[in-house]
Image (cartoon, rainbow, N blue to C red):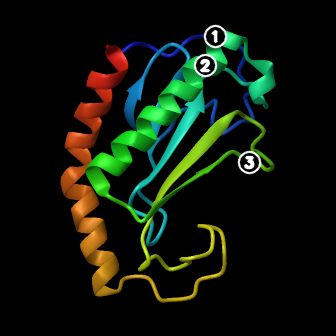
Amino acid sequence: MPEAVSGPVSPDCPLCQVQHETVLWQDARLRIIHVPHEPGLPAYFRVIWQRHVPEMTDLEEGDRRHLWQVLTQVEQGMRLHFQPAKINLAAFGNQVPHLHWHLIGRWPSDPQFPGSAWSPVVRPDGSPEQQAVAARVAERLPAFRQWLVQQLVA
């Protein structure tokens, strides 16, 4: 896997300081991580720009195209491997002003569904349906990662 690019980083930024991440793929410009610790959201991924920039418009046009291509590939792979009812794609950065995108596979059994992943919980976490989804995602995660690597190195 290629090394992350060195460049502007912020010592106070948790996304600049790579720690305890499950990196599925990275190149010199960005990395794709699995976020396994969100209750009821087993298919939660982030695409994180390696350099500390706050907005898409801080990127050169070629970098923006590359980022969008990767986001599209992650979404396509999530649909192919996990078959969620919907995929939420979000970029906030209000609390961490470092360019990153959230890609979250959603199912009707999610604790917050049909609201956003940050909406109030409307059903308890850990239902049999949620457990089945989590098991299916865990089982298919290695194939998803392998598919991503094949798509993104091509």
Instruction: Give the residue at mark 2.
Output: 65
On screen, 72 above or below 34?
above
In front: label 2 or label 3: 2
Q: Residue at x 44, y 72 (%)?
A: 40
Q: CA distance from mark 2 to mark 1?
A: 5 Å
On screen, 98 above or below 119?
above
**Residue 34 at x, y = what percent?**
42, 46
Q: Residue at x 36, y 50 (%)?
A: 79
Q: CA distance from mark 3 to mark 1?
A: 22 Å
On screen, 61 above or below 116?
above
Is the Cβ of the residue at disc 2 closer than 8 Å to that at disc 1?
yes
Which secondary structure lies at badge 3?
loop
Dot 1 amino acid type: Gly
Instruction: Give the residue at mark 3.
Output: 92
**Residue 32 shows in the view:** yes
Quadrant of image for the N terminus? top left
The label shown at residue 11 is none
The label shown at residue 62 is 1
In front: label 3 or label 1: 1
Which secondary structure lies at badge 1?
helix
